[in-house]
Amino acid sequence: MPTLTFIEAKPTNSDKEGLNILFIYKVDDATQSRTIHVLGAETSWGMNEQQKVEYMQKLFTGTLAYVKHHWETYGELPDTDKQLDSQSDFPPYQPGPTAWEGYTLQLVD
């Protein structure tokens, strides 16, 4: 039963079309981190900083739903450096915002 601790979120591609995010986390007490790269569907050009934060938090909610679904379906974590498309890879979830910083997710068998 792994415990994931999210340690960083890095926006990428924010000066172009789309708002992509790298969510970086560690599993249990590992020294090496893992990454999930989320390709966002929204364009960030017209967003202010608060809107970008809220959108990142919604993408994080979808990322959590994906990780939980993957664990429940396959009994393993997604591949490291996994790339997800927010429009096609996320399972159904409530798209409310979830703050990522220091978030801990414990997966159970």
Image: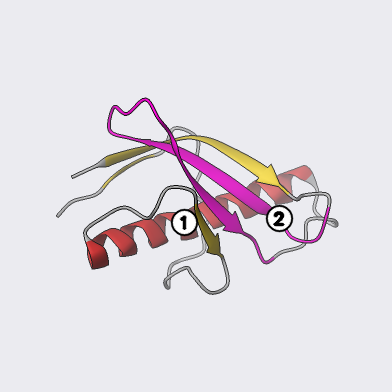
Q: Residue at position x 62%, y 49% from top?
A: 21
Based on the displayed image, in which of its 4 quarters is residue 85 positioned? Answer: bottom right
Q: Is residue 40 magenta?
A: yes
Q: Residue 66 vs residue 8: left or right?
A: left
Mark 2 or mark 1: which comes first in sequence? 2
Q: Badge 1: few (under 14), some or many (20 or more) residues near its Cα, within 10 Å?
A: many
Q: Residue at position x 80%, y 53% from top?
A: 47
Q: Residue 84 vs residue 17: left or right?
A: left
Q: Which mark is residue 63?
A: 1
Residue extent of the magenta highlight: 16-41
Colour treatment of the image: secondary structure
Residue 70, x across and y down, in percent: 32, 62
Q: Residue 74 vs residue 95: left or right?
A: left
Q: Residue at position x 72%, y 45% from top?
A: 50
Q: Which mark is residue 19?
A: 2
Circle 2/circle 1 CB separation < 8 Å: no
Label 1, secondary structure: give it. helix
Label 2, secondary structure: give it. loop
The amino acid pointed to by label 2 is Leu
Q: From the image, which quarter does the N terminus lie in?
A: top left
Distance from disc 2 to disc 1, alpha carbons, whole Å, reads: 14 Å
Based on the displayed image, in which of its 4 quarters is residue 22 positioned? Answer: top right
Looking at the image, is 84 positioned above or below residue 99? below
Task: Report the label total.
Answer: 2
Q: Nearer the viewer, residue 74 or 103?
A: 74
Residue 72, x across and y down, in percent: 24, 63
Q: Badge 2: few (under 14), some or many (20 or more) residues near its Cα, within 10 Å?
A: many
Q: Residue at position x 58%, y 72% from top?
A: 87
Q: Nearer the viewer, residue 105 or 99?
A: 105
The amino acid pointed to by label 1 is Thr
Residue 4, x across and y down, in percent: 34, 40
